[in-house]
Image (cartoon, grey):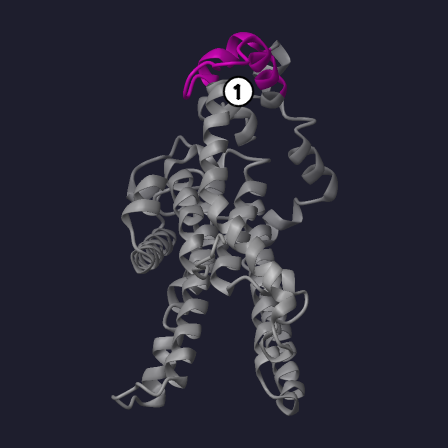
Amino acid sequence: VVVAIRHSFTTSGRKLLLEIILWNGFVLAVVGAIQISTGATGPLWTNLDNETAYFFSTFGYPNMAGCYFMMIFAIGMAVWRDKMERMRILLKSDNISIPQSSHTIFWRKHYALIPTFVAYLAALNTLSRASIILVTTIAVIIFSHTIVSAFHKIDKAKRFKARVVSVMAFLALVVTSVFFMPEEMRSELNTVDSGSMLDRFSGKRETHVAVGLKIFKEYPLYGVGGWGYKHFSISRMTDSQLKSVSAPGSINVHNDYLQFLVEHGIIGTAFIVAIFVMTLMPVVRKYGYMVRLLRFLPDKKRPPPPGQIFVVPAPAFILFTGTVFVLIHAVSDCVLRSPANLILLFIIVASIDAYMPEFKIDNE
């Protein structure tokens, strides 16, 4: 996937691919909403009465669904910011030969917000506690980034009014979220506390983390093979640990990094990490060059402080932020066990470079 996207897709092709994925996520979110309203008992109206896990859309596990729609939300925000910037540049150009109405310009700027907002609601409706917290945190970060960027570009006389409007809009969103939060979501969030979150991220009380470490110590180099943990774990569990396994489908480490080490060993995991790092290297090199150029920019062209953050184009910043939050989610769950999530993560990482500027550096 990474090779195909990096070397077979043009910059515009990668952007188009992300927009197609965004609308595909929108369709899956709508399917999930219809399932809820029709009282479906399983993904795509299959019968899963014997399953205890909550499902959403085509996902049979809420955390996987929440992670997927969190990534779709990040893609949507990146597409939206890219379209806004491209339209801004287009409107400043003298080459516009066809006049367009203000309504047309508005929709060309903002239509990507429709599937983006639906993806955000879908992430919330998966009832995954981690996804609810993470996708909302991403939304706050992107909102803050957008506001700071917008303030930097508008006249000083208009900044006070813009601040007031922004604060009022944010407060309205918070109040709406608090007072109109569905009871199911409120119940899930009420179970969250700092102690349980710390235990979940550290794996201190997770049975599968302890068993996974045992297996890894036995097969450190090559692991036990893909999906091998569930076959090797049972025989290494104590009676008390076996009682904590609620169902066969729950036999995952719930820490993707440890599970990769258990199943693929140090060598296999190193290959996965190498692909990830090499895919990001062009972005890292460009970022370093852009940071070095900051000191040569005149004041009017400088990004808002801190320049090390705002020097990055907004879509690239958003996709990178989404990637970081997926990696955080993977510490405490098995979200990357879903091929849909793992493939989408690599697509996002391979597409960040499409939003970075191109540089021609003279080696001399």
Where residue 144 appears, as percent x and y from the top left, is 61, 68
Where residue 56 appears, as percent x and y from the top left, is 40, 46
Q: Which residues are magenta?
A: 210-237
Q: Quadrant of residue 236?
A: top right
Label 1 Cα neighbours within 10 Å, binned few <14 / some 14-19 / many ≥20? some
Relative side of 261 to 91, left or right: right
Judged from this view, the residue extending furthest toward the front is: 364
In the image, residue 330 sits, relative to residue 115, either above or below, namely above
Residue that numbered label 1 is attached to? 266
Q: Residue at x 46, y 13 (%)?
A: 224
Where residue 137 appears, as percent x and y from the top left, is 60, 56
In the image, residue 64 sits, relative to residue 122, either above or below, namely above
Relative side of 75 to 103, left or right: right
Q: Amino acid at mark 1?
A: Ile
Residue 1 in sight here: no
In which quadrant of the rendered image does the N terminus lie?
top left
Q: Is residue 344 magenta?
A: no
Q: Tag 1's secondary structure?
A: helix
Q: Residue at x 38, y 68 (%)?
A: 112
Dominant secondary structure of the residues highlighted in magenta in the image: helix
